[in-house]
Image (cartoon, grey):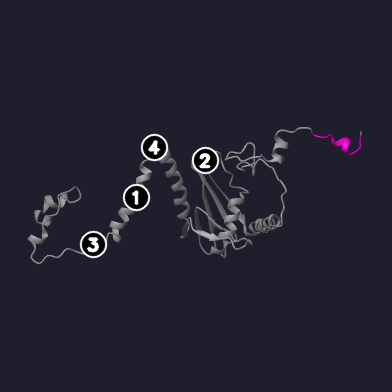
Amino acid sequence: MTERFSASVAGRHMACHASANLELAIPNWTDPVRDETAGQKAVGTSRHKMLEPMMELSPKDLQLMIDLMQYVADLRKTRRFKVLIEEKVQATWLDSAPYTTADLVLHTQDELHIIDYKWGKIPVDVIDNEQLLFYGVSYAPLAPKAKKVTFHILQPYADNFDSWTVSTTELKKFMDQAIATEKAIANGSLSFGPSDKHCLFCPANPHSRGDKGKPLCPAMMQILYPQNRMDEDAILGLD
């Protein structure tokens, strides 16, 4: 069967007409067995699929993605890391043993990096970030000889590319606090702890940046809209 003249074979056909119909040109010709999932054909197909959605981005968005990928590329050049991409692990250090998933984890026997992508425009602080510390404890077994863990926040729309390194001793402190918190909640604790940092996306926060439920948090309401506050001196009988 004559091979269809197309962009991918134009040069070959123009140089060698016989290549368009090898069955006729070469006696007893047999077509090769083609495996579209192997070799450079598979690489090319995969790369095309990866680039297609990227090329739909605006020039500004495309540049931000390049900045993010450059950060990761520079980090990966420093060691021959094993790479985990959104690979789920079980936090067996907690009684409830929940599953958790970090965006990107780079590890060797003695080094561990946790990378978290953020896409909002409000900068997220990498320092004292409990989400990252939770990931650190959960993925720590991948680097049993590591003495520290480095966390990275990559937030291109906030121009926020930052890292924070903690010792395994500090990580252990967080783990102990998290275990104690889970036990307290399991035992029925309903104590409020309002703060600017941790209440930002709470659905009960009157100023939540996420979806709101109702009724709103009484502790935050009292802080934001104090009403009928009692005179502390009067309560203590100091009048």
Name the one closer to the observer, 107 or 29. Answer: 29
Q: CA distance from mark 4 to mark 2?
A: 18 Å
Q: Amino acid at mark 1?
A: Lys
Q: Amino acid at mark 2?
A: Gly
The residue identified by callout 3 is: 34
Q: Earlier in the sequence, mark 1 or mark 4?
A: 1
Label 1 residue SS: helix
Say which mark, if any, is on residue 49.
1
Mark 2 residue crowding within 10 angstroms, few (<14) / some (14–19) / many (20+): few
Q: CA distance from mark 2 to mark 1?
A: 25 Å
Label 3 residue SS: loop
The percent coordinates of residue 64 (x first, y second) are 44, 41
Say which mark, if any, is on residue 70.
none
Is 221 displayed left or right of 154 in the figure? right
Quadrant of the snapshot with the N terminus: bottom left
Residue drawn at x 39%, y 37% as measured from the top left: 59
Is 185 displayed left or right of 99 in the figure? right
The percent coordinates of residue 72 (x first, y second) are 46, 50
The residue identified by callout 2 is: 120
Magenta-highlighted residues: 229-238
Label 4 residue SS: helix
